Image (cartoon, rainbow, N blue to C red):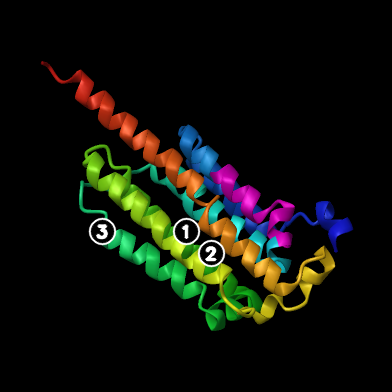
Amino acid sequence: MPNELWLRWNLDPGLLIALTLMAFLMRRSPSGLLGVAALAVAFVSPLCALSAALFSARVVHHVLIMAVAAPLLALVRPARKESSPGPALVMFTIVLWAWHWPVAYDFALGWVPAYWLMQATLLVAAVVFWRRVLHPQQAEGSALLAILGAWMQMALLGALLTFAPETLYAIHATAPLAWSLSPLADQQLGGLLMWVPAGLPFLVWGVLVARRGWRTLSERPA
């Protein structure tokens, strides 16, 4: 219930041990520790409980995992060699869209093992993508196009959800009512969040990549 949300911290021992172990392994990497902190916000804070009730909160949850935590973790250990980010972008897209297929989505939120499979595959696909995009030797043009492609496919999915004439996810059929939202309005809000605000972290990473390219260009001898 809304008035109890801030009491809904996820203190599952297995989850806390896993996050603590990750933080220990990445203790010398500021970006790695920030990535673990982002995962803690996603899975430990009340956002996790809220995302079980509202599809719009689930969108925030997934963006936090795929566009904030994943690139921070990818910086810890970039891909072994520079390669085209295209195949990784395709995988990123397939995984995201597959889990938003209504049958798969309801299945994941209705069964704990499937839920963690969803989260793991989303995170892994995103880390693989960002490891290639943020590789120090990756051509800035290719990296920027891949970042734009990742945001555009997410925006397209968000647009489809925003303009869907009916609710798609049975798992969110009643819980939004407690938040004074109809299930359709909750879905539309989630689509809008995926469509526009979700692009902000992609924009930030794009600016950082462009800045790296500009710095490299300016350091070349005339």
Q: Residue at x 48, y 42 (%)?
A: 25
Name the residue tied to disc 2: 119
Pointer 3 and pointer 2: residues touching (CB < 8 Å)?
no
Identify the amino acid type marked 1.
Leu
| Picture disc at residue 123 | 1
Q: Quadrant of residue 103?
A: bottom right
Residue located farthest toward the right when viewing the structure as drawn: 3
| Residue type, numbered disc 2 | Gln
Secondary element type, mark 3: helix
Query: In which quadrant will I find the N terminus?
Result: bottom right
Tell me the residue at 27%/37% (across/down): 136
Name the residue at the left extreme.
222
Q: Earlier in the sequence, mark 3 or mark 2?
A: 3
How crowded pointer 2 is (Cα within 10 Å; few <14, some 14-19, many 20+) is rated as some
Horizontal side, residue 159 vs residue 170: left or right: left
User: Height in image: 73 above or below 159?
Assistant: above
Q: Main secondary structure of the magenta part?
A: helix
Magenta residues, as a range?
A: 36-50
**Is the Cβ of the residue at disc 1 closer than 8 Å to that at disc 2?**
yes
At 52% from the left edge and 64% from the top edge, which residue is drawn? 158
Q: Which mark is residue 36?
A: none
Residue ID for mark 3 = 86
Residue 108: percent from the left, percent from the top? Answer: 58, 76
Query: Quick one: label 3, few (<14), some, or many (20+) residues within 10 Å?
Result: some
